[in-house]
Image: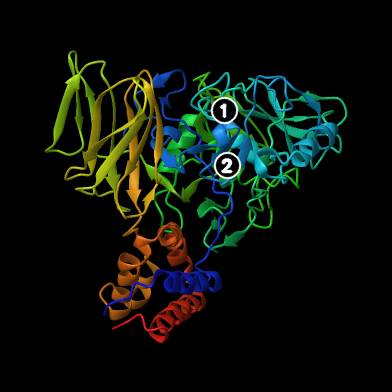
Amino acid sequence: MIIKTNGIKVLVTLSAVFLLSPIALAVDCPIPDTGQTKCYDDEQEITCPQPGEDFYGQDAQYTCNPHSYTSLAGGIMVQDNVTGLIWENKTDDGSIHDKDNTYYWQLVQSVFIDTLNSQNFGGYSDWRLPTVMELSFLVDRDRDDPSINTTYFPNTVSSYYWSSTTSAGDPYGAWGVDFYDGYGSLDDDGKSYGYGYVRAVRSGQCGSFDNYVDNGDGTVTNTDTGLMWQQDTVGWVLYTWQEALSYCETLTLASHNDWRLPNVNELQSLVDYTRHDPAINTDYFPNAASSLYWSSTTNAGHPGLAWYVYFYDGGFGYGGESGGYLYVRAVRGGQCGSLDTSTTTTVASTTTTISGSTTTTTTIDAGELYIYGNIVDSEENGVQGIPVVLKFNSKEGGSEQDTSLTDANGGFIFPDLDENTYYVYPESVHAYSPEKEEVELKNEPVYVKFIQLEGSSGCPATEIYGANSDETNLLRALRDNVLKNDPAGRELIKLYYAYSPLVVEMMKSAEFKEEVKENFGLMLRLLVTIDYIN
């Protein structure tokens, strides 16, 4: 069976099927990663622990939708490539965009936002004040003062920025984020008296991620994010941060044993800012405590403190990792993968050895800067023979690039690098998560990881038709011969693989499985009808 490659017809056909199908679980605003790359105990930075060791399972050991940005129109705007949001960039020129301008919350719309829209700033007239979640998702929790990527947002003041989110329990209160360290707080008098800085945003809007499915087994799935949550606050037991990490990593619930402590962004996504006491959907989380819950994220400026979310009103701050006792809610799934791979770093007195496998080793001088990593499939198996591209601007001017080929365990390395900002990405027709990594190389080597989405575990078509059936082979041919050759087609492939595990999970319902089968059947019949098969 051969599919004729009329790309437009296939894309229109497949798009129609995706729109009609329950497989199309759209995510308008995915949850970006926190940016944390270092590991900590309850006092200081440490070498990232291995499974079974104390403090294993913290934020830096999982990567979830890594931050990725693109400067637009000469840097006056920045696009967040994870959420799709476009942000105003601040200046230092005395204009309406000047970094030092502050506003009363009540006057932000009339004095600032309306002016941007009347001026058609950047060619757009739909600028607005961001929600508190959108604003907090900009925070880079690997740094502070300011806690944001200053390469893309260079004129950020280490202070309080307004959001559009008001308090559910206080008619005078409005939420904001302090970009000194990323603290999220409610200004009780904010609407009337408080001054704050402002950064405008446009394109889409992230509100509460409030689309849930009660799985009936002690878990709840959020269909916006793909995350599965532990439903109960177990026994209302309080834990230290170390105990919270251990509890989640060793938890077996609903036949799953890959639970983890959520990072602060994931945990905040549970907050419903239209509610308080507790600020969460109690239809799905009926025994939630109006109290503090641990995240896996450490405060980068104060290693003895970890971030929490306060589910009384939705605030987020930090508390002592050793002396603090807070509640816990475990999570699993989503676009997260463990950084615990076969790649190891061994520091000796004179050399550093980087091994992407047990057979391939590159030895470099101690103190040398390098970028290294792995490409793995959905089952954490290394993928061999994939070209990985490193792009950067040379000191002499102009853009340069280098290429490394992955070894038998998917390992690659770019040695002997200078301090610089680099872009690393696989050069392949396959879909990857992430597509590209931006790396700021400064004081130490940096590890990056790409997951090849093709072959992701939990394929709905294989579940329905079998791995080697005519139907499955036809769909593979459509993917490999047509969709991979078109940018829009590659986006559809990524969408399919991103949500396949969740769809397979939901196919435990016979009724839902039959709906999925009917939509696959529609796709196959349409391909035959429009003569795509010889």
Q: Is residue 456 left or right of residue 265?
A: left
Say whether marks 2 and 1 touch (CB < 8 Å): no
**Residue placed most toward the observer, 426 or 398:** 398
Real-space Cα distance between discs 2 and 1? Answer: 25 Å
Q: Residue at 21%, 37% (x, y): give it.
A: 356
Q: Is residue 90 left or right of residue 323?
A: right
Q: Amino acid at mark 2?
A: Leu
- Vertical relation: 58 (above or below) 8: above
Q: Amino acid at mark 1?
A: Phe
- Helix, strand or loop status at disc 2: helix
**Residue placed most toward the observer, 118 or 499:** 118
What label sits on residue 153 in the rendered view? 1
Upstream in sequence: badge 2 or badge 1: 1
Identify the residue under disc 2.
267
Q: Residues within 10 Å of mark 1 (few under 14, many from 20)?
A: many
**Residue placed most toward the observer, 12 or 269:** 12
User: In this view, which residue lies farthest toward the top?
Assistant: 349
- Vertical relation: 57 (above or below) 125: above
